[in-house]
Amino acid sequence: MKFELIEGVSTLSFDLIGTLALAIILLMMGYAIRQRVSFLNKFCIPAPVIGGLIFSVLALVLRQSDLIQFKMDTVLQSPLMIAFFTTVGLGGSLALLKKGGIVLIVYWLSAGVLSISQNVIGVAVAKLTGINPILGIMSGAVSMAGGHGGAAAFGETAESVMGITGSLTVGMAAATFGLISGSLLGGPVARFLILKHDLKPTFAKYGTVDEALGTSDSTEINYHSVMYHLAILTVVMVIGSVASRFLSSMMGDLILPGYVGAMFVAVILRNLNDKIKLFKFNFKIIDLFGDVSLGIFLSMALMSLKLWELAGLAGPMFIILAAQVVFIVLFAVFIVFRLVGKDFDAAIMVSGMLGHGLGATPNAIANMGSVTEKYGPSSKAFLIVPLVGAFLVDIIHIPNIVWFMNFFK
């Protein structure tokens, strides 16, 4: 760390190690605050969002007061992002489609349609309000269905490659709005459907997510097993990065985020391995790598937000986000609920879609948990929603975002 004058402003510059240390400290601070503040705990606000936003607000106040500004070395952000999405890909067994049957496929396609619709809404309202369509996409599927991870990943691409100032900040702000909205709406909407249609649980057994994913591995977690999985993870990241560069060079002006290649190479490896059993994966270790990578990645992205860039975008952003919330509620209640059975399980899945369609899969699970705790169990929903929200929707979601961003760049 060092103090210096940049354009006449006192600046505290963090080197790579300093930036990493600050990100981890803010992440742990976020966990501590969430444990003590019931509102944050109730709505499953991610710890890196809490810690990172507190720092970015502090940075805004200090900058606007002409006291000091901060400069970060976020070079680790990209490899952490790639590592996280690689672990997502390794969890993506397409054989899981058989576990949920036709209802899983219908729910999956519905989530895909929602993702596409969110981008259509974002672009349409952005054009009506006179802002760049890319910022509309950042307030669309990128941050709604994609959450903070998608906002950080695509926001970085939009700013560094496309030169759209404020993309990361808009995406993160929209993701936070969506996260809270999805948590607030999931339970009440499901309750409305259950009471209106007098729905009762079926008590049918569909298995658990752990059983479907094969994550109940009892392999001991030790130095050798951790290094074994780290070797696989890093090799897939390297191959995926090469694949991304190759695809970008073959497709001319196509803008492809760096993690896309690694994620889909991981998907291919996982599904080949399901057939030939070359590697023995312990998904607890893979999930641990993913959680650590995502936590530090998001903390680093949020603490370096330039909140002052939101000043002229607050009005258009609010209109876009309000439209997104109204649409997902209508879509889930009048279309998805009917398509997936119009029964008790369908109502629980609606609460889940509001969770991951506006925020993240943990919010979907939290929504469903709060409803089933009061009205009864739904093993069907707890199998289908996490599988779709955590991975399957990305098969539609990511190409959708890439196409929209390249079309409107």
Image (cartoon, rainbow, N blue to C red):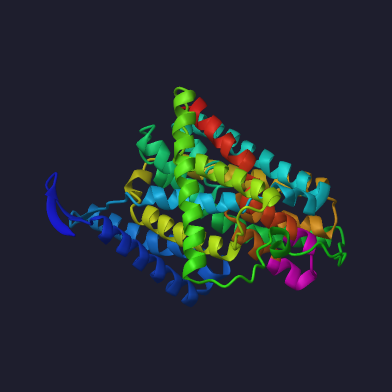
376 magenta-colored:
yes
- Residue 188, by quadrant, is bottom right
**Residue at 47% of width from left, 35% of height from top?**
244
In the picture shown, does residue 157 fall above or below 11? above
Residue 226's spot in the image, x, y percent?
A: 49, 65
Q: Which residues are magenta?
A: 369-382
Residue situated in front as seen by the camera: 24 or 275: 275
Using the image, determine if residue 106 lies above or below residue 130. Answer: below
Residue name at image x 67 percent, y 68 percent = 216
Which residue does the image show at 74% across and 55% down from the upper left? 384
Q: Position of residue 233 (x, y in %)?
A: 49, 53
304 or 83, which is in the foreground? 83
Q: At 24% across and 58% down in the image, what residue appears?
A: 62
Q: Position of residue 94 (x, y in %)?
A: 70, 47
Q: Is residue 230 left or right of residue 115?
A: left
Q: Is residue 314 visible?
A: no
Residue 377 on the magenta segment: yes
The residue nearer to you, when weighing 153 against 336, is 153
Give the position of the C terminus as an image quadrant: top left
Q: Quadrant of the N terminus?
A: bottom left
Residue 145, how many percent across, how many down?
59, 47
Most frequent secondary structure within the magenta stretch: helix
Instruction: Look at the image and tell me whether residue 81 can be seen.
Output: yes
